[in-house]
Image: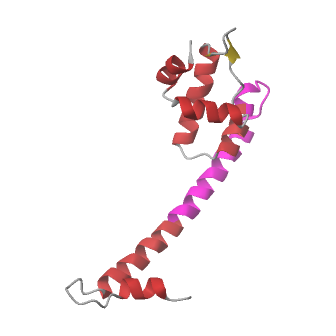
Amino acid sequence: MNIGAASQESGVPRKTIRYYESIGLIPEASRTQSGYRTYGQTDIDTLRFVQRARGLGFSVRHVGALLGLWNDHDRASSDVKNLALEHIREIDHKITELQDIRNTLIHLTERCHGDDRPDCPILEQFARSE
C-alpha cells in the first residue's frame, strides 16, 4: 500500500511517517520502480506500535529502544519494565514541575485585582530578573 493508505491504516500522518524514516526510527519503506513508497502489514504494525508509545509520551529515543526490544524475541521483560519505570519517573518529575507552575500562577492571579487599573503583579513578576 502507498503512504496515504499506510497513514490512514496506522493513524500516523504521512509527514510523520517520512520523519520517522528520515531519523531511522522505522526502516525506510520499499519503493516502486517509479519511486513511490510501499508499505506492508509489518510496517503498519510498527507504525501503530510507535503511535501508541508516542501517545503515552515516550520520547523518540525511548520508542527506538522499545522497538528494538519488541523485535528481539529473546529480550528480557525486565528491560521493557525498566524503560517504562524510567518513563514513569520522568512523568512524575514533569507533574511536579507543572504543579509548581500552577501554584505560582494561582498565587499571581490571586494578587492581581483584574480591574481597569494598569498595575499587574503578574506582569511585574514576569519582568523581574530573578
Instruction: Please identify the residue farthest to the left as the structure is shown.
Output: 116
Q: Is residue 81 left or right of residue 49?
A: right
Q: Is residue 71 left or right of residue 4?
A: right
Nearest the viewer among 76 and 8 is: 8
Q: Is residue 25 visible?
A: no
Check the picture and name the quadrant holding the C terminus: bottom right
Instruction: Please identify the residue farthest to the top as the structure is shown.
Output: 33
Q: Residue 92's x, y, as percent?
A: 56, 60
Instruction: Name the residue: 63% across, 36% down.
Output: 19
Q: Which residues are magenta?
A: 68-95
Q: Is residue 22 above or below residue 43?
A: below
Q: Residue 67's x, y, as percent?
A: 69, 32
Q: Residue 88's x, y, as percent?
A: 59, 53
Check the picture and name the quadrant holding the N terminus: top right
What predominant SS class does the magenta segment belong to? helix
Q: Is residue 30 left or right of residue 4?
A: right
Number of numbered discs overlaid on the protein picture? 0
Instruction: Name the residue: 37% across, 82% down.
Output: 107
Q: Is residue 128 visible?
A: yes
Instruction: Name the residue: 28% across, 89% down.
Output: 118
Q: Hey, which quadrant is residue 18 in on the image?
A: top right
Nearest the viewer among 125 and 99 is: 125
Q: Is residue 79 magenta?
A: yes
Q: Is residue 57 magenta?
A: no
Nearest the viewer among 23 and 32 is: 32
Nearest the viewer among 81 and 21 is: 21
Q: Residue 9's x, y, as percent?
A: 49, 20
